[in-house]
Every structure is written in C-alpha cells, then in structure tokens.
Image (cartoon, rainbow, N blue to C red):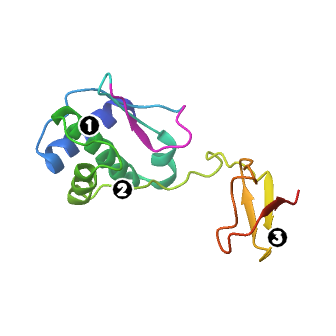
C-alpha cells in the first residue's frame, strides 16, 4: 500500500464512519516506532506506521485510522480530543476504533529495570526503572521502610 491508497482509504473511512470528510493529508511515516499512528495538531495531518500494515494487515490499520480520525474530528470541532477525554472515548467506542495497537516485533523500546528495593518489614520487593527517594517513600503494603538492594 502506498500513500495515495492510504489517503483514499482514510477519506473513505472518514465519510463512512464519521459522516464528515477528511480534508487533510494522510501518509505513512516509517520513522514511527512506538505508535501505530499520530495526529499532528498544527497541520491536522495524520501519519501511520507502515509496519503495522505489513505485520497485521488491513483490519489493524483500519482500527488505527479510526482512532486517529477521532482525534482529528474532535479537535477540528473543538471538543475533547485527548485519550482521557470523555468525548474521545465515546466517539472511539461508537465508530469501533482500536484503543491500543498491537506491538510490532523488534520495534518497541523496552527499558530495563535498573533499581531494586525491598521493604524492611514485610520483605516485599519493588522493581523500578527510575530511582526513588527512600526517605520519602514507604512500602505500599505495610508502610515499612524501603532500602535499595542492588
């Protein structure tokens, strides 16, 4: 699939699912790594990760297009277009867009756990990517003092 086919597909889905035309540009962006697509607020254009289409096919891409079109149409209308907004959640549910996209193999970055903490009271262990201040934070289970193990 090329950008012209993607553009016509986005325009078709916009009319069929939303009843409103899509009047901007939709393109594939191979630089996207951790997301299936994105809506650009300033230009109102949509970009999609071509790996999702290559790996999972048309159904996955359709769900991602509907998701991004929800952002697009709500932002244009001045309604809540962010993931946490009620308008977004209701519209996404109504059109059947995907809330999350599947992970593409070898594309998602995974941060390794660097810090390990343990409670001195109940011996519960905690793994963290970021360091925490043990003088300010306590065990979530028993309120005991935390100490760094490695």
Q: Quadrant of the N terminus?
A: top left
Residue 22 position in % (x across, y down): 20, 34
**Left or right of 146, for residue 59:** left
User: Neighbour class for label 3 at 10 Å: few (<14), some, many (≥20)?
Assistant: some
Within 10 Å of disc 1 (Cα), the crowding (few <14, some 14-19, many 20+) is many
Determine whether the residue tagged by mark 3 lies in a helix, strand or loop: loop
Q: Residue furthest bottom?
A: 122
Instruction: Tell me the element at label 2.
Output: loop
On residue 29, which mark appears? none
First in sequence: mark 2 or mark 3? 2
Read off the residue under disc 1: 72
Crowding around mark 2 (Cα neighbors within 10 Å: few <14, some 14 to 19, many 20+) is some
Taking the spot 43% from the left edge, 53% from the top edge, the residue there is: 57
Provide the residue span drawn in magenta: 31-41
Number of the front mark, 1 or 3: 3
- Mark 2 to mark 3 CA distance (whole Å): 43 Å
Q: Which residue is mark 2?
A: 98
Quick check: 22 above or below 59? Answer: above
Mark 3 highlights which residue? 120
Q: Are marks 2 and 3 in contact (CB under 8 Å)?
A: no
Q: Position of residue 27 (x, y in %)?
A: 38, 30
């Amino acid at each position: 699939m090329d950008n012209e086919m993607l553009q016509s597909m986005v325009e078709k889905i916009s009319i069929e699912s939303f009843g409103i035309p899509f009047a901007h540009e939709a393109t594939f962006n191979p630089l996207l790594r951790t997301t299936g697509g994105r809506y650009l607020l300033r230009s109102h254009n949509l970009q999609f990760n071509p790996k999702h289409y290559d790996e999972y096919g048309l159904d996955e891409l359709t769900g991602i297009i509907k998701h991004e079109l929800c952002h697009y149409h709500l932002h244009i209308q001045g309604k809540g277009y962010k993931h946490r907004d009620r308008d977004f959640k209701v519209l996404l549910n109504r059109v059947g867009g995907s809330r999350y996209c599947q992970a593409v193999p070898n594309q998602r970055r995974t941060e390794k756990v660097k810090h390990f903490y343990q409670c001195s009271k109940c011996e519960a262990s905690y793994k963290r990517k970021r360091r925490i201040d043990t003088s300010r934070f306590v065990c979530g289970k028993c309120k005991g003092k935390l100490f760094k193990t490695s």
